[in-house]
Amino acid sequence: MATIRDIMPAFDLLQPTSIAGARELLEQHGRDAWVLAGGLDSLDWLKDRIKKPKVVVDLTGIEELKGVRSTSDGIEIGAMTTLTKVVQHPVIKEKYGLLAKAASVVASPQIRNQGTIGGNVSQDARCWYYRAGWPCYRAGGNICYADTPVGRNSEHAILHADRCVAVNPSDTAPALIALDAKFVIATRKGERVADAEDYFVGPDIDITRLHILQPGDLLTAIRIPPALAGAQFYFEKVRDRNVWDFPLLNVASAMVVSGGKIEQIRIAVNGAAARPLRLKTVERAVLGKAPNAATGEMAGELAVKGAVPLQFNAYKIPLMRNLVKRAIGGVEEAV
Amino acid sequence: MNALQWAIDPWGKLVPIHIVWLLIWAAVIAGLLFFIVHATYVRYFAKPRQFAAEVPPPIASEIPARVPMHSMVARLYHWITAATMFTLLFTAFLPRVGFQFPWVTWHWIAGSVMTVLVIFHIFHASFWMDFWAIWPDRIDITDAGHRIRRFFGRPAPPPRKAAKYTFDVKLSHGAFMVAGLTMIVTGVLMMSRVRTIFFPRNPYLFSDMTWGIIYVLHGLAGVVLIAVVMVHVYFTLIRPEYRPLLNAMIFGWMSRDSYLEEYDTKRWAVEAMISSPESRNRKD
């Protein structure tokens, strides 16, 4: 008999109107609480009855979590700002076009209207074994069903796998890393600001989470400093269905070129590992070089060093190599 | 409280997946309670130790001043094993109590080292050491019975002095052996579920139920070792009456006085010729 999976299990819906109120509720309920932002990741879990929280803390009523604000040190985007607002915001479009581009290719227009930037960077892995509720490592069990000779792992990790081979599915995460964004987190001990790349964790550190948020923590805002405003940006996402899908791989780079040489660069990829990867080795290697085909070729080779393909995802290695090559040398230079 | 974590596998069967991590704290608390109870008993209630007289009594001058106890190889084995054991316990359990770091690689490397050490130890003890010296013998069992009867105030002759290893050291070795071998055998099997340099991954080597039992045994052996290591450290580092054993494990020998006080010269005969020149010159 088919399992009915369209009615959510009962929970208490709590709707705070301030960050302090939300924090208090999260503190009070600890691991029993589920944070609801846009609901696009959450409702899958709840309707599938895989996650059964006692309490859902809905953040949609907290106005201070919404909107884009210009500050003396760049911009601050509230965590509950929808992806559509991010895409359409004039300052983001003008100075941080990389983020606007990344946000514009998330899923579909309807999802971008509902989905938030905080939710996009904090969403859970999409590994089908994990999402089906099987007791894999990420679910607290002792096996990875994807990393087996017969596992369906075409969308899984080629780098930094550690027991679990799921990948981070966010499109905005690599863009925020490339822009050197800071994530503002309200915690029990007060406000904590983490570099974008440090917001994400791999299975070697914590196999049950994709980010550093602990029960009770709340991502409140994302700050983007002005250092790379207006730099030369590149974002590309490759997916199975171009109209609406998670990335197989994506790449984001912010580059400052002066006198024909790369003076400053930050580059990150996602979909290759359980956390978006900032390619520091590539950054160091291309500094001072011309952003051309030869540099791109070298960067691409460097980017995939150490990659270990699974049964069905070896295609990700040349894909990543070419994406990095295009990010450095330009689209016309790619093979 | 359920001591195990359970899950429904893809075929709908209920299978164990881990021990409940609360058992880590249960082991720590058990170790601490042992410290408190034992220290309190020794401080306030224990009677002076009595041993049955040796026949004939030993002639002290025939005993070297430094009684050799552990060879350099045995000592090196012990300390490398200790370091490896701590590495295994810390890498296994610190992430479970909130200290997050990339532990898996360190853990399987330490586990591999431990496996090699134990295989070495089995051969070394079998062919170069007195293999049976560490196993409880009939005298140990009889004397343990006497000790228990005397503890409860019932008449029993005093126990004899010890052989090379006292009965509690033998019990400690037994606990380490059972928990350690369980940990090693299950750990080696579990290495087929992670990427190592030794063999290709094969998560489907066993059924989900068998894997669950393997994980549970590995976890149980781990938490038992927490308590056993704590007790071992308590006796050897804190209890003054065990200081000669610590010295022997560091320097290889114990003093003549310690030897004569605790050990039966018949059950653990010392060869005088191994003694230092200093001890050979002394005529006490």
Image (cartoon, coloured by chain):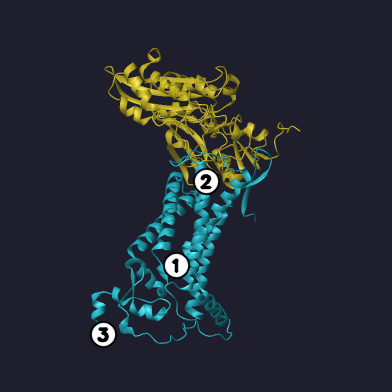
Chain colours: A yellow, B cyan
Which corner quadrant holds the N terminus of chain A?
top right
Residue that carries the numbered disc 1 in the rendered image: B234
Residue B216's place in the image compared with A240, above or below, is below
Q: Residue B156: x, y in percent?
A: 56, 85
Spatial separation of the CA atoms under disc 2 and disc 1: 31 Å
Mark 3 crowdedness (10 Å alpha carbons): few <14, some 14-19, many ≥20: few
The x and y percentages for residue A127 are: 57, 32
The chain to which mark 2 is attached is B
> Marks 2 and 1: CB-CB under 8 Å?
no
The foreground one among A225 and B193 is B193
- The verdict on a common chain for dots 1 and 3 is yes
Q: What is the spatial separation of the Cα atoms under label 1 and label 3, in whole angstroms?
A: 37 Å
Q: Nearer the viewer, residue A266 or B12?
A: B12
Query: How far apart are the alpha carbons under marks 3 and 2?
Result: 59 Å
Image point (61%, 47%), residue name: B210
Q: Secondary structure at mark 3?
A: loop
Q: Is residue B102 left or right of residue A81?
A: left
- Residue position for label 2: B190
Q: Within the image, what quadrant is residue A154 found in?
A: top right
Chain of the residue where label 3 is placed in the rendered structure: B
Give whichever of discs 3 and 2 has the lower sequence position: 2
Kindly identify the residue that appears in the image at 35 percent across and 20 percent down: A297
Residue that mark 3 sits on: B283
